[in-house]
C-alpha cells in the first residue's frame, strides 16, 4: 500500500497498529506552550489521535487539526469530546485549510511522507503560515531510508526549508520518545522569512 494514500493509514488506525501514537502530549510541546506568551492560530496536520489539540486549546491557542484517514479523525473526535469540532478530515496538500496561521505544529507528519513529497510539504507550510510564522515541533532525524517513518538526514533540513530560518534546535531526551523514535528526535522551530 502507498503511504501517501488515506487507506494506508486508515488500515493502521482500524487495526490499532500505531507505534507513533504517544497516547498523550509530548513534554517538549508543553514546555513550548508554557514559554509562548502570545497564543494565536495553529494548524496540526496529520493529527492522528489529536492529543495536542487539547493542549493548545488549554493554552488559549485556536487549533485546527486535520487528518486524511477517517478512522484517525473519528478517534480524535471521540477523545476530544467537546473539542471534536476542532478536528477535520482533510488533505493537507489539496484542501482549503484557511490561514494564514501563526504556527504549524509538526509531530510525525513529515516522517510519514516519502522524501519525494517533502518539497511539496515545505512549500505548503510556507503557503499556510503568515510571514514570521513558525513551523515548530518534533522532527525525526536519522539515516534509515526504508520508511515510514522516513527520517531527515543532517543536511536535508537546510535544503528543504530555504524560506525558513532555524531559530531553535535541541534533542528530545530518549526517555520522552517512543521506542520507534528514541534518540532520533529533535525539537525544532523554523521561522518563515
Image (tube, rainbow, N blue to C red):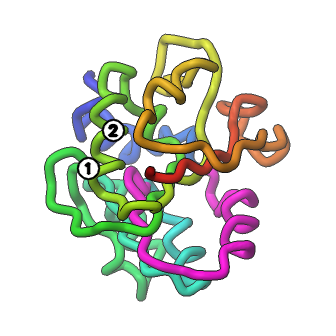
Secondary-structure class at tag 2:
helix
Residue 37 horizontal/vertical position (percent) = 66, 81
Residue 117 horizontal/vertical position (percent) = 30, 27
Answer left or right for 134 relative to 97: right
Residue at the far front: name it: 193
Disc 2 designates what residue? 121
Residue 97 horizontal/vertical position (percent) = 22, 63
Answer left or right for 182 relative to 108: right
Question: What segment carries the magenta color?
Answer: 22-47
Disc 1 designates what residue? 92
Q: Quadrant of residue 169?
A: top right
As drawn, 132 above or below 106: below
As drawn, 8 above or below 114: below
Q: Residues within 10 Å of mark 1 (few under 14, many from 20)?
A: some
34 magenta-colored: yes
Can you say which quadrant of the picture contains the N terminus?
top left
Secondary-structure class at tag 1:
loop
As drawn, 86 above or below 109: below
Between circles 2 and 1, the one closer to the viewer is 2
Q: What residue is drawn where x is 48% and y is 12%?
A: 146
Residue 122 horizontal/vertical position (percent) = 36, 38
CA–CA distance in space, label 2 to label 1: 9 Å
Nearer the observer, 123 or 25: 123
Q: What residue is drawn where x is 54% and y is 44%?
A: 165
Q: What residue is drawn where x is 54% and y is 48%?
A: 190
Answer left or right for 111 relative to 4: right
127 magenta-colored: no
Q: What residue is drawn where x is 67% and y is 33%?
A: 181
Amino acid at each position: 500500500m502507498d503511504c501517501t494514500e488515506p487507506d494506508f493509514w486508515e488500515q493502521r488506525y482500524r487495526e490499532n497498529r500505531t507505534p507513533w501514537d504517544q497516547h498523550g502530549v509530548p513534554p517538549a510541546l508543553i514546555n513550548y506552550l508554557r514559554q509562548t506568551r502570545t497564543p494565536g492560530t495553529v494548524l496540526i496536520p496529520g493529527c492522528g489521535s489529536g492529543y495536542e489539540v487539547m493542549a493548545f486549546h488549554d493554552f488559549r491557542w485556536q487549533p485546527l487539526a486535520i487528518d486524511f484517514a477517517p478512522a484517525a479523525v473519528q478517534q480524535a473526535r471521540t477523545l476530544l469530546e467537546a473539542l471534536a469540532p476542532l478536528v477535520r478530515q482533510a488533505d493537507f496538500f489539496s484542501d482549503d485549510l484557511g490561514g494564514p496561521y501563526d504556527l504549524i505544529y509538526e509531530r510525525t507528519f513529515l516522517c510519514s511522507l516519502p522524501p519525494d513529497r517533502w518539497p511539496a510539504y515545505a512549500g505548503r507550510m510556507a503557503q499556510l503560515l503568515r510571514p514570521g510564522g513558525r513551523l515548530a515541533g518534533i522532527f525525526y532525524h536519522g539515516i534509515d531510508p526504508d520508511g515510514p517513518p522516513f527520517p531527515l538526514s543532517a543536511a536535508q533540513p537546510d535544503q528543504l526549508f530555504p524560506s525558513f530560518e532555524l531559530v531553535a534546535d535541541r534533542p528530545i531526551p530518549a526517555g520522552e520518545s517512543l521506542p520507534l523514535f528514541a534518540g532520533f528526535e529533535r525539537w525544532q522551530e523554523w521561522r518563515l522569512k
